[in-house]
Image: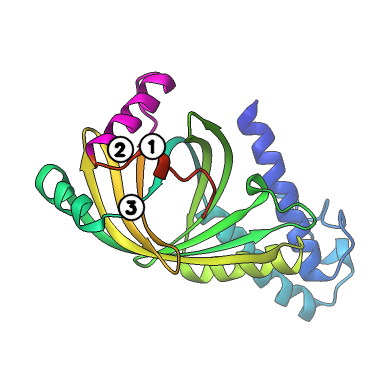
Amino acid sequence: LEHRLEGRRVLETHRRWISHDLGLPTGAARSGEEDGFPGEEDVGLSRKRCARNNILLRTRRDLFTRMTATTACEIELKAHVRDVERVRAFLKAHAVFRKKYFKRDRYFFNPPDESMDSLLRLRNANGSHVFTSKKRHMERSVEINEETEMSVRKNDARKIVRFITGVLGYRDYVIKEKKGRAYSYSGVRIELSEVSPLGHFVEIEILDGTSSAEEQIALLHSILADLGIPESDIETTPY
């Protein structure tokens, strides 16, 4: 049932998108073609204009076909790092280095709601383009997020940005850049990042762990202690 409802929501969004591109009122895309998209007779277009718009419709269909969203539970602890060299030395000695990264995050909001749950993030990291929406709550200074992500091609990302800003009314909220190194330690992911102009942060993250949330929260706090970072440096405000 959940998959069918999601399919209906995607189809309705798709129809509204098509109606906007054709200059039609919402709901005008209906009977015409077998798949529910408007044909020449339905919208009363000339053959030339219909041919042009059919190309547009195929482009939109292809775009939706390429997009697949995934949902995961993310448990994450963030903290300021005041002694960067000490933390870096600990990770070099005890953790497994995974990769360097540079992440550019562009956040959008849908006025008038500027809450964190309403924000939509577009992340460009090492050539990838990922849209993310999070439902966030805090427990013992730890973020527990229901995270939905969708990876897209660069050109598709541009089209989606034009759609959400031009049709859905989203506005730019903030752009954030961070660079750093990712490690594995005790079965979790640790990122030591420099966030301009705020300074250095550590993010300790568990994705879809098998233990209970309470056990995972305790593990994150124990790893923070291993890094030599006091609880007073935990950051609960999004940055």
Based on the displayed image, in which of its 4 quarters is residue 46 positioned?
bottom right
Amino acid type, residue under disc 1 in the picture: Glu
- Camera-nearest label, 2 or 1: 1
Dominant SS in magenta:
helix
Q: Are marks 2 and 1 in contact (CB under 8 Å)?
A: yes
- Mark 2 burial class by Cα count in 10 Å: few <14, some 14-19, many 20+: many
Q: Which mark is residue 224?
A: 2
Q: What residue is shown at x 64% (from left), y 61% (from top)? A: 108
Residue 226 location in percent, x, y?
A: 22, 36
Q: CA distance from mark 1 to mark 3?
A: 11 Å
Magenta stretch: give its range: 206-226
- According to the picture, the residue beneath numbered tag 1 turns out to be 231
Q: Which residue is mark 3?
A: 81
**x%, y% of residue 211?**
35, 20
Q: Quadrant of residue 190?
A: top left
Image location of residue 183, percent across then percent down: 23, 48
Q: Amino acid at mark 2?
A: Leu
Q: Residue at x 38, y 37 (%)?
A: 231
Alpha carbon distance from label 2 to label 1: 8 Å
Label 3 SS: loop
Q: Are marks 1 and 3 in contact (CB under 8 Å)?
A: no
